[in-house]
Image (cartoon, rainbow, N blue to C red):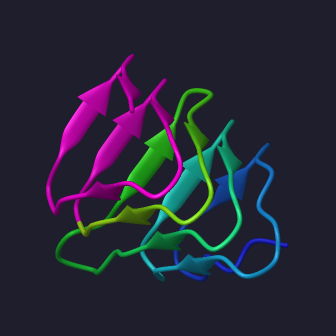
Amino acid sequence: ACRCRARPCRRSAIPDRVLIGDETTIQDSIIGRHVNVKSSKSHPTWILGVSVIGDDVVIGEGCVLTETKVYTHKVIPNGQRVGNQIIE
């Protein structure tokens, strides 16, 4: 079950042991284990369009990931806007 309180998480796979900030929107995506998605009211994070996030990834506040694949053990800095890319 998704732990996003303020925003929707739709048609996505989100396992246990994932930390999701309250202002996160996740749609049509797959999230790996032990992922930390940081998000705040002033800097919401969006993961959209069949994005796949590997295990042990940290995504900073205010990021927008669209159709993006992120390999394991990566850190996405705050405010990054990434579309249709593979982050190795």
Q: Quadrant of the N terminus?
A: bottom right
59 lies left or right of 24: left
Q: Residue furthest top?
A: 84
67 lies left or right of 74: right
Instruction: Pinpoint residue 19: horizontal percent, then vertical percent.
Output: 57, 81
Q: Is residue 64 above or below residue 35?
A: above
Towards the viewer: 35 or 50: 35
Q: Quadrant of the C terminus?
A: top left
Q: Is residue 64 above or below residue 74?
A: above
Instruction: Pinpoint residue 60: horizontal percent, then vertical percent.
Output: 27, 67
Q: Which residues are magenta?
A: 62-88
What residue lies at 60% left-to-right and 48% top-to-bottom? 54
What residue lies at 79% left-to-right and 43% top-to-bottom? 11
Task: Specify the quadrant of the image occupied by residue 16.
Answer: bottom right
Membership of 77 in magenta stretch: yes
Q: Is residue 76 above or below residue 11?
A: below
What residue lies at 18% left-to-right and 59% top-to-bottom? 77
Task: Specify the quadrant of the image occupied by residue 7.
Answer: bottom right
Instruction: Pinpoint residue 74: horizontal percent, then vertical percent.
Output: 38, 54
Instruction: Pinpoint residue 79: horizontal percent, then vertical percent.
Output: 14, 56
Question: Count the marks: how many?
Answer: 0
